[in-house]
Amino acid sequence: MNPIEHGSGPPRAGLTRSLKATLLLGLLIPLMVFVPLRVWFDVEATQRHTEAAFDQELADKALALGNLIQSDSNGIRFELNIQTERMMRTDREGRTMFLILGPTGGRLYGDDPLGSPALALMSDEQRYVDARPGGGEPMRMVVLGVRCGVQLCQVRVAETLDSRRRLRAEALRRNVTFTLLTAVVLMAVVLITVQRALRPLRSINDQIAQRSLEDLRPLQPGRVPSEVRPLIGAIDELLGRVGAAAQQQRHFIADAAHQLRTPLTALRTETELALLETHPDSVHSLLQRLHRSARRSARLADQLLSLARTEAASVGNRPPIETFDLKAVAQDAVQDWVPRAVHAGVDLGFQLDNAKVRGQRHLVRELLANLIHNALEYVPQQAGDAARVTVRTAREGAKAVLEVEDNGPGIAADQRELVFERFYRQPGSAGAGSGLGLAIVRDIARAHGANVALCEGGDGAGLKVRVEFESAD
């Protein structure tokens, strides 16, 4: 969809970005910033919870060991059976150590490397320390102050970090995977939502792109967002104003052409009579030029009127559609065009078969009239006494075909599209046409859904105009 430009200057870069890209960038960029932050916060929270759970497990073990310290008149003792000690030290992924210190800091039981660093604690106070007992691998240690009678002992329990690392890695992988999946789902939802939101706009765009210049009907908004409805309403108002202006223009052309026909017909008749009456030889060439100009002007007025009628039919002001035979239309043309062909010295022949079509009979008759007129206008300039024009109608499969072929100069291949433009005449053309004939033919064919093709004649010379309608049989 082309951007709407104001003024004659080049469009600014901001006007060329599509609405879809703007929405996606506005939604996806914050999402791309949010996802890493969400992963970081989740990982941090998970690690804090994991560390707290492991530390609490260490504290529970220290408290359980502290309950085994006994104090009586015989002194302070610590007793631990083999099964309990084995259970305390068992760790599938790492190693657990513990140490019981007496009131004076002496070892009561356990692993000596845990004696460092020396700490002073209150009763029931616990402290966590990251240490390397004996210079070995890193361990997490809890130190718990335990009352031993009236004195204070310490219980130290330490474990390696393997389990913590594994759980942190699993938590990181789990959080990253979940967050990425969430991000992918959100991106897909955003993309689908944006596409669905823009689908009515694409429908409006398709409607406008497929319209011809004559199709100025209001747009079909469908289920467009409420924010877009004012724009559609403005476009419909613009189409209505353009349609009204175009209709006024067609009416003006039709009225002007209609008003010109009567005086031009009278002028043509008067010049014909003047040529037939006795007149000085000095004015004969003047009368001939005047008669040719009058005849050409009258033909131009007729073509302008036909053009206005064709345009009116193409925008919906159509008379009822009827089924008729191209053969009958061509037969009606015999009485109008055979005398003119004889006068011009052209052999006008007809090869007619039944070929029914649906449409507007008077417009197809005008189409054929323009083709025959063009052929009669240009053939004598090239072929002389051997000039001939052939009109054919036939049914070929699902097509009803109308052809007008001549053996005149033809039309160069690079000119065959240009000659359909209004008032365009092929360079070097010697005929007296106005350049509207083939434009009228094309417009009438389009109004009937037919195709027009310009080809070479049967002998490789001349021109064959082929019009293919949908057959009504």
Image (spheres, rainbow, N blue to C red):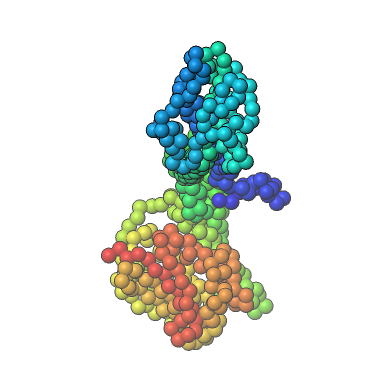
| Residue 307 visible in image | yes
| Residue 63 visible in image | no
Judge by depth and name the residue closer to the eye, 465 or 117.
Answer: 117
Q: Is residue 350 positioned above or below 36 on the image?
A: below
Q: Position of residue 5 (x, y in %)?
A: 65, 47
Q: Position of residue 256 (x, y in %)?
A: 56, 54
| Residue sitting at x 57%, y 34% | 112
Count of numbered labels shown in the rendering: 0
Q: Position of residue 25 (x, y in %)?
A: 58, 44
Q: Is residue 451 positioned above or below 6 on the image?
A: below
Residue 28 lies in what quarter of the image?
top right
| Residue sitting at x 56%, y 23% | 102
Relative to 1, is 196 on the left or the right?
left
Judge by depth and name the residue closer to the eye, 428 or 305.
Answer: 428
Q: Position of residue 214 (x, y in %)?
A: 50, 53
Question: Looking at the rendering, in which quadrant would you find the C terminus?
Answer: bottom left
Judge by depth and name the residue closer to the eye, 400 or 42.
Answer: 42
| Residue sitting at x 62%, y 75% | 427
Residue 431 lies in what quarter of the image?
bottom right
| Residue sitting at x 53%, y 67% | 420
The extreme front residue here reads 74
The extreme right residue here reads 9
